Image (tube, rainbow, N blue to C red):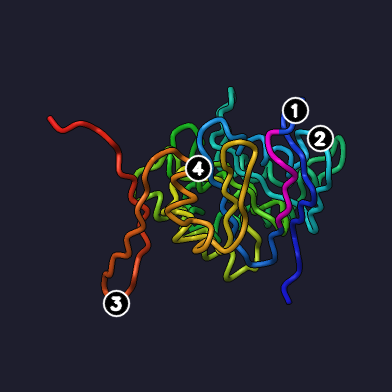
């Protein structure tokens, strides 16, 4: 049995008032979990609670092995190089008033190589495309050497090619390195393609967690988003692709 890397038990979270009924879910080594819900449901607040920047209102969160966090975006007033950004992932391992040593630098280079972006190491971070920036932020999170990678809407500002690249990367990191990955998304199709389990945040403080194929039913998605969503299986080159198609009620011209 795979080791549990993230466990939330009877978790209550929010800013002063709990957003949902007590949450119970786990993430194990090598497993990908998706979190879905409409705008304002508190997906980012949940991530902040899991990584410890927002205190829980009740219940417990336990993470074994450390967390690497990837925000939606990262901006800096300084012209940092890509290598400098990734090296920031070692901050928790560097003592007060100390500088990163050769081992920290080696780990940062390894993270860049894992994501195949080592040639960008000396580029200014602000000069990169959106897709490249996202990969750099993931490399920074990998440099923490945590057992859990938490990503806040990692594909939200990317074109289709880069969305695919990030989803492929998430799968590769989980399968090849045994990292647990939890990510938020607005696209049920991304969860269907990449996630083993899904936490779906529903109206009226309700939620459902379980195997992605069971959680992402048409009925649950209709309840979550207030829009009719149909699941379509598209066959292509010998493989079935689950596609969650929203049926927007827009009058014809």
**Earlier-in-chain disc, 4 versus 3:** 4
Q: Which residue is mark 2?
A: 57
- Above-or-below relation of 177 to 40: below
In percent of the image, x 81 and y 44: which residue is there? Answer: 94
**Earlier-in-chain disc, 1 versus 3:** 1
Tell me residue 117's x, y (percent): 49, 53
Left or right placement of residue 206 versus residue 65 in this view: left
In percent of the image, x 79 and y 54: which residue is there? Answer: 63
Q: CA distance from mark 1 to mark 4?
A: 21 Å
Left or right placement of residue 71 versus residue 190 in this view: right
Q: Which residue is mark 1?
A: 17
Q: Nearer the viewer, residue 232 or 100?
A: 232
Q: CA distance from mark 1 to mark 2?
A: 8 Å
Element at label 1: loop
Q: CA distance from mark 3 to mark 2?
A: 48 Å
Element at label 2: loop
Mark 3 vs mark 2: in front = 2
Mark 4 vs mark 3: in front = 4
Element at label 4: helix
Q: Which residue is mark 3?
A: 238
Q: Nearer the viewer, residue 175 or 136?
A: 175
**Earlier-in-chain disc, 1 versus 2:** 1
Pointer 1 and pointer 2: residues touching (CB < 8 Å)? Answer: yes
Q: Tell me where the magenta segment starts and ends, as one range.
A: 19-25
Q: Which mark is residue 224?
A: 4
Picture quarter with the C terminus: top left
Pointer 1 and pointer 3: residues touching (CB < 8 Å)? Answer: no
């Amino acid at each position: 049995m795979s080791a549990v890397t993230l466990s939330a038990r009877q978790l209550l979270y929010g800013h002063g008032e709990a957003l949902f009924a007590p949450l119970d879910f786990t993430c194990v080594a090598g497993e990908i979990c998706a979190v879905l819900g409409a705008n304002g449901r508190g997906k980012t607040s949940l991530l902040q609670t899991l990584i410890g920047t927002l205190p829980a209102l009740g219940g417990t969160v336990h993470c074994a092995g450390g967390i690497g966090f990837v925000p939606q975006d990262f901006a800096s007033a300084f012209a940092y190089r890509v290598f400098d950004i990734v090296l920031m992932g070692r901050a928790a391992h560097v003592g007060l008033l100390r500088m990163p040593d050769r081992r920290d630098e080696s780990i940062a280079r390894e993270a860049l190589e894992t994501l195949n972006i080592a040639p960008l190491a000396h580029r200014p971070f602000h000069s990169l495309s959106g897709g490249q920036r996202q990969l750099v932020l993931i490399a920074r999170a990998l440099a923490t050497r945590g057992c859990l990678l938490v990503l806040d809407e990692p594909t939200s500002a990317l074109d289709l090619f880069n969305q695919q690249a990030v989803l492929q990367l998430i799968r590769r990191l989980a399968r090849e390195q045994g990292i647990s990955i939890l990510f938020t998304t607005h696209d049920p199709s991304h969860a269907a393609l990449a996630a083993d389990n899904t936490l779906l945040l529903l109206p009226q403080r309700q939620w459902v967690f379980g195997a992605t194929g069971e959680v992402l039913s048409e009925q649950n998605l209709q309840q979550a988003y207030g829009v009719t969503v149909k699941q379509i299986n598209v066959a292509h080159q010998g493989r079935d692709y689950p596609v969650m198609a929203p049926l927007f009620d827009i009058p014809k011209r």
